[in-house]
């Protein structure tokens, strides 16, 4: 994994995240302005705000990312697909869906494949394809369950495996889980999210194999970077 050499490169790893259900229009506008100012890869926001964010960011390189089946993952696959379809129609460039966690824990490959592929079909129904990231809540899983989830997600054809929603009581991204995901699904990229709050955290996740970071403390992360950080 190539390590960022300056703040501009580091910013391109970051999905600047504001997923609070109480976020207001004014906060979303500020959030989008921050993403443009600092050059973050995307804003990650609730579906409620995709239309607004897409309108604000349409002349900038900043992508619009949103969620489906968030935060529990227990919705029916067709409901997640419907959420993704509406979000894409509103201007979303990337979808972070929460996988069906019960099927991961039970080792139910058939159900999990259908869960992911139902959403993936929507994401690949237009050109260019919309990126699909699949959230597995790795902190709540055993290593064996993580390996099963990763291999199934890779087989399904999703673009990214994302560690966490950041809301599960078990916690967020852990370095050992990022490394395990990288080993288990080499064809998938990795988004580390949940508890990644400092420059040191971010660089460690990138070194472990993450090519995207979900963070709410994005500005602090950028401001804490210097060439000596690497």
Image: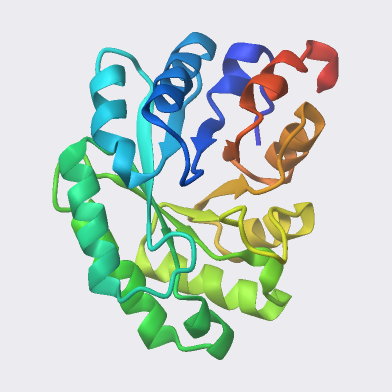
In the picture provided, is 166 more to the left or to the right than 52? right
Q: Quadrant of the C terminus?
A: top right
Q: Position of residue 104 (x, y in %)?
A: 53, 80
Q: Which quadrant would the N terminus be assigned to in this image? A: top right
**Residue at left offset 35%, top offset 33%:** 64
Q: Residue at x 63, y 72 (%)?
A: 146
Q: Is residue 78 above or below residue 220?
A: below
Q: Residue furthest right?
A: 228
Q: Is residue 160 above or below residue 3?
A: below
Residue 196, image x, y percentages: 71, 41
Can residue 93 be seen?
A: no
Residue 201, quarter of the rendered image: top right
Q: How many marks?
A: 0
Could you tell whether 230 is left or right of 136 in the image? right
Please say whether residue 61 is visible from this viewpoint.
yes
Give the answer, above or below, for where 122 lies relative to 75: above
x then y, percent, for residue 28: 41, 27
Tell me the colour scheme of the image: rainbow
At x 24%, y 46%, the residue is: 87
Residue 171: give x, y in percent of width and height.
Answer: 72, 59
Q: Nearer the viewer, residue 109 or 214?
A: 214
190 to the left or right of 219 = left
Indicate whether 90 appears above or below 71: above
Corner quadrant of residue 74 = bottom left
Give the quadrant of residue 150. Answer: bottom right
- Seen from the viewer's position, the closer of residues 120 and 99 is 99
Q: Which residue appears at 24% of the width and 63% of the height?
A: 81
Of all residues, the one furthest to the top in this rendering is 37
């Amino acid at each position: 994994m190539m390590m960022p050499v300056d703040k501009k490169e580091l910013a391109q790893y970051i999905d600047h995240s504001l997923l609070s259900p109480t976020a207001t229009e004014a906060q979303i506008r500020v959030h989008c302005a921050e993403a443009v100012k600092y050059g973050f890869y995307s804003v990650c926001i609730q579906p409620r705000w995709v239309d607004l964010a897409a309108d604000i960011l349409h002349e900038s390189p900043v992508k619009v990312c949103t969620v489906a089946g968030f935060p529990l993952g227990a919705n029916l696959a067709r409901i997640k697909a419907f959420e993704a379809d509406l979000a894409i129609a509103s201007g979303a460039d990337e979808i972070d869906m929460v996988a069906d966690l019960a099927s991961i824990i039970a080792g139910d490959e058939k159900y999990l494949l259908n869960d992911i592929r139902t959403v993936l079909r929507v994401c690949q129904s237009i050109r260019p394809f919309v990126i699909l990231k699949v959230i597995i809540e790795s902190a709540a899983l055993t290593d064996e369950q993580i390996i099963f989830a990763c291999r199934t997600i890779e087989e399904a054809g999703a673009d990214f495996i994302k560690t966490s929603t950041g809301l599960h009581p078990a916690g967020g991204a852990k370095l050992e889980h990022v490394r395990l995901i990288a080993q288990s699904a080499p064809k998938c990229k990795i988004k580390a999210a949940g508890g990644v709050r400092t420059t040191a955290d971010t660089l460690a996740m990138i070194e472990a194999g993450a090519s995207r970071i979900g963070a709410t403390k994005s500005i602090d992360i950028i401001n804490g970077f210097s060439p000596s950080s690497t």
